[in-house]
Image: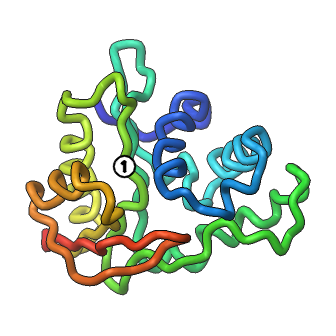
Amino acid sequence: MIRRAKKSDFPFIYPILKQIFDEMDMESIKKLPESQFYDLMKLGFISEDYRYSYRRIWVAVNNQDQPVGMIDMYPYHDQSIIDFVLKKEYPKVGLPTQTVIFEDQEAWSHEWYIDALAVDPKHWGKHIASQLMDFAEKIAQNKGYKLISLNVDKENPRAQQLYVHKGYKSKNEMTIGDRTYDHMVKEI
C-alpha cells in the first residue's frame, strides 16, 4: 500500500533516505556529525515546506504500516522555498544560519520533480520503486503536469536502468553537490 508520510514515520524514513545522502557523497553533509544531521533532517521532515517534509513524501508500507520505500516529490516552482525554510532550524542543532547544505536547482520549469526515491534494501526486488514511480505520475497528472523529471547519478546504472524502463529519457547533465547527474524527463 502507498500512503502519505506521517510525522511519526521519520525513524523509518531516515535510514531509507540516508542511502541517497550516502551515495551523493556531498561535502556539505559529510562535514556534519551524524547526530547533528539526523536532528536537522528530523526538524525539516516535521516542517510543512522543507524539501524532505512529510508533506512531500509518500511511502510504501509493510503489513505493520511501517515505511519500506519512499518517494519525495514537488512542483518546479516550490524550489524557491524548499531549502530556505530549513535555515531557521539551523540554530536549534548548533549550525550557523549561513550554512549551505542543498543549494542546487534540480528541476526545470513546468516539471513535476521526483527529488528522492529509495527502498529499504531488505525490500529490493519487490517492485516497490516501480510502484512509487507509477504513483508519482498519477499525482503529477492530477496536479496538471505533463512532464515528470528526476536526476540520476551517472554512477548508478541500476537506477538508470529502472528509469529508462519506465520511459524516462536523458535531457541534459547537471551537477548537484559534488556529482554529475543525468536529468531525465518523461511526458505523461
| Residue at the spot 60% in from the left edge and 37% down from the top edge | 7
Q: Which residue is mark 1?
A: 117
When the figure is inspected, residue 123 is found, relative to residue 46, above or below; the finding is above
In-image side of 39 versus 79 (left or right): right
Picture quadrant of residue 183: bottom left
Label 1, secondary structure: give it: strand
Q: Position of residue 137 (x, y in %)?
A: 21, 58
Is 14 in front, or is 20? Answer: 20
| Residue at the spot 70% in from the left edge and 66% down from the top edge | 85
Indicate the amino acid at tag 1: Leu
Picture quadrant of residue 147: bottom left
Q: Position of residue 181 (x, y in %)?
A: 36, 71
Q: Outermost residue, front direction?
A: 155
Q: Position of residue 172 (x, y in %)?
A: 27, 83
Task: State the colouring used for the structure image.
Answer: rainbow
| Residue at the spot 43% in from the left edge and 28% down from the top edge | 67
Picture quadrant of residue 141: bottom left
Image quadrant holding the C terminus, namely: bottom left
Image quadrant holding the N terminus, namely: top left
Is 85 in front, or is 96? Answer: 96
* Label 1 crowd (10 A; few <14 / some 14-19 / many >=20): many
When the figure is inspected, residue 132 is found, relative to residue 95, above or below; the finding is above
In-image side of 2 versus 171 (left or right): right
When the figure is inspected, residue 187 is found, relative to residue 50, above or below; the finding is below
In-image side of 37 versus 3 (left or right): right
Q: Position of residue 44 (x, y in %)?
A: 67, 52
In-image side of 48 versus 75 (left or right): right
